[in-house]
């Protein structure tokens, strides 16, 4: 099949490249000409493991093209896939301006029948709006399909080629065989449903996963007070098949371009039909508070942050991505700077993206993770990049002014911390080292 993917971002680029592997011809379209020029030179504008090798292979084999010419790309295609952004408006609602403008452009470009397939995450009822917009700009026939995307950044290729399920929302049953053929080889789990249910499945899935994270974070906060270990608790819970072990990793809360915006959008979708989604409102509130537990632990360990030097490991919202959208690191660093701390930050991939969005004279950008620890009063680990797991913690402690490590992602085991001299705080696990490492009577005497 001939496909045009409108929007060559984290979703459009990966989906476009992966659809070529099924033998389709794909044109990835973006209005950002710089992005298209880079891609033409086989350079990915995003960091996603494995993507550049696939771009190179498919460009060379002639199945993949990049273009900023939406009109021609639509004309050459049987299926047009919408993968433009749907960011949050200030009130939390999804901003549909990119969807609406792309739909109008598609309508204007059509010179025959097309299938329009929406991969962007859009509020319930949006595909009907898309239909109206396209119809207002063309007299040619077309069909609409809602095919929400579930890939995760950092494992996007694997998730696209081997998804747990593919959701297809349609109102013309004649499209079902085409959609099955397009997704052939990806998964057996193809759920065909109506368009509104497909749109809702996407929001409900993200909201549920976000709920799991906020739930385990609250359990972690209680664990700290009652002396339990949340990693043990999560393991014990997760073995129950009805609960499942994934998304029970306590930490500093979820970030990224999806959970924060999609939870807020679903609250608005409910609000627009006079339904108050109380549970999801709490999920968002808990998530917002969780990042500040890092600051509470800093205050507990070193007192005032005025003039202190704090090392930060990790700026991306999760490992294996350069995406810093809604990363909890942003608000943590802003708060540190506001309190007058010097902040030494390190991220293996996302530092440039972060710096474009936020910089401050009190921030020092480090070239290696160890540099963030040297002479610091504490190091806070905010993103669980693999590189941090292998750091020599003895050397880290020796080079710090105060050997305090605040692990926001529970990366280190008790065994790794023991004997390092570090005062170690994590999330929902007992504190180690420092005065807490001494017996209560000795600690009291000191
Ligand atoms: N990022 C993810 O992990 C992920 C996963 C699943 C679903 N989604 C959803 O997919 C959608 C896209 O997300 P993303 O992260 O890929 O966004 P993104 O911001 O990385 O990419 C969107 C791209 O669309 C381009 N664009 C906007 N309007 C255009 C137009 N009229 N013509 C051509 N190009 C246009 C932009 O220049 C940009 O490159 C969103 O709705 C998001 O919620 C994202
Ligand atoms: O147990 C966990 C799992 C995740 N997170 C955090 O949650 C956020 C999101 O992580 P993840 O879901 O792995 O990344 P995304 O790339 O944002 O993917 C989510 O959002 C996408 C966009 O809608 C969906 O397609 C995916 O299915 C959905 O997992 C990150 O900040 C993680 O650190 C936790 O704190 N604890």
Image (cartoon, helix red, strand yellow):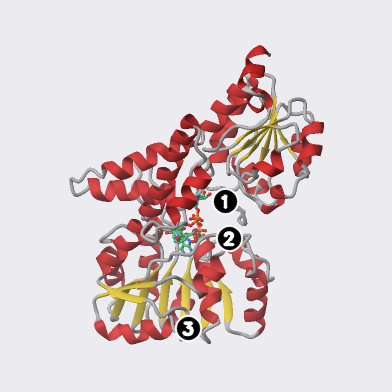
Left or right, 257 with reference to 304:
left
Q: Secondary structure at mark 1?
A: loop
Residue depicted at 51% across the width and 49% down the height = 249
Rendered location of residue 183, percent (x, y)? 43, 80
Residue depicted at 30% across the width and 79% down the height = 142
Rendered location of residue 375, percent (x, y)? 79, 28
Q: Is mark 1 within 8 Å of ligand 2?
A: yes
Q: Secondary structure at mark 3?
A: loop
Residue depicted at 67% across the width and 24% down the height = 438
Q: Is residue 346 visible?
A: no
Rendered location of residue 265, percent (x, y)? 34, 49
- Label ID, residue 185: 3
Q: Is residue 222 visible?
A: yes
Q: Which residue is identified by label 2?
A: 154
Q: Which is more N-terminal, label 2 or label 3?
A: 2
- Circle 1 Cα neighbour tier, 10 Å, few/some/many (<14 / 14–19 / ≥20): many
**Image marks 1 and 2: residues in contact by CB distance under 8 Å:** yes
């Amino acid at each position: 099949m001939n496909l045009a993917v409108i929007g060559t971002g984290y979703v459009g680029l990966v989906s476009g490249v992966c659809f070529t592997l099924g033998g389709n011809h794909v044109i990835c379209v973006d209005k950002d000409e710089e992005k298209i020029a880079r891609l033409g030179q086989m350079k990915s504008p995003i960091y996603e493991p494995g993507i550049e090798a696939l771009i190179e292979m498919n460009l060379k084999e002639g199945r993949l093209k990049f273009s900023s010419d939406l009109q021609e790309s639509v004309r050459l295609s049987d299926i047009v896939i919408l993968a433009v952004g749907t960011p949050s408006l200030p009130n939390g609602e999804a901003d549909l301006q990119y969807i609406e403008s792309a739909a109008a452009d598609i309508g204007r470009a059509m010179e025959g029948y097309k299938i329009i397939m929406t991969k962007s995450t859009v509020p319930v009822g949006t595909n009907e709006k898309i239909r109206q917009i396209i119809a207002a700009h063309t007299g040619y026939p077309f069909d609409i399909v809602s095919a929400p995307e579930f890939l995760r950044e950092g494992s996007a290729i694997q998730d696209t080629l081997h998804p747990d399920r593919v959701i297809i929302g349609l109102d013309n049953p004649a499209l079902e065989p085409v959609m099955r053929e397009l997704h052939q080889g990806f998964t057996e789990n193809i759920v065909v449903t109506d368009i509104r249910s497909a749109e809702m499945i996407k929001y409900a899935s993200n909201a549920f996963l976000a709920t799991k994270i906020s739930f385990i974070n609250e359990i972690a906060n209680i664990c700290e007070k009652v002396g339990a270990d949340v990693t043990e608790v999560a393991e014990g819970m997760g073995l129950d098949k009805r609960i499942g072990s994934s998304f029970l990793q306590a930490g500093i809360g979820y970030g990224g371009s999806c959970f924060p915006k999609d939870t807020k959008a679903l609250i608005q979708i409910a609000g627009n039909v006079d339904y108050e989604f109380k549970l999801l409102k709490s999920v968002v509130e808990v998530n917002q508070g969780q990042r500040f537990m890092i600051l509470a632990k800093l205050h507990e360990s070193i007192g005032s942050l005025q003039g202190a030097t704090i090392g930060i490991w990790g700026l991306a919202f999760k490992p294996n991505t350069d995406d810093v959208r809604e990363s909890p690191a942003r608000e943590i660093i802003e708060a540190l700077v506001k309190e007058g701390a010097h902040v030494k930050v390190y991220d293996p991939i996302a530092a440039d993206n972060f710096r474009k969005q936020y910089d401050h004279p009190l921030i020092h950008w480090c070239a290696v993770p160890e540099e963030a620890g040297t002479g610091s009063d504490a190091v806070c680990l905010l993103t669980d990049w693999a590189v941090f797991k292998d750091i020599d913690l003895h050397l880290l402690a020796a080079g710090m002014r105060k050997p305090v490590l605040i692990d926001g992602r529970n990366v280190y085991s008790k065994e790794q911390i023991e004997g390092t001299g570090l005062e170690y705080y994590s999330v929902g696990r007992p504190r180690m080292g420092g005065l807490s490492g001494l017996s209560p009577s000795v600690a009291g005497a000191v």
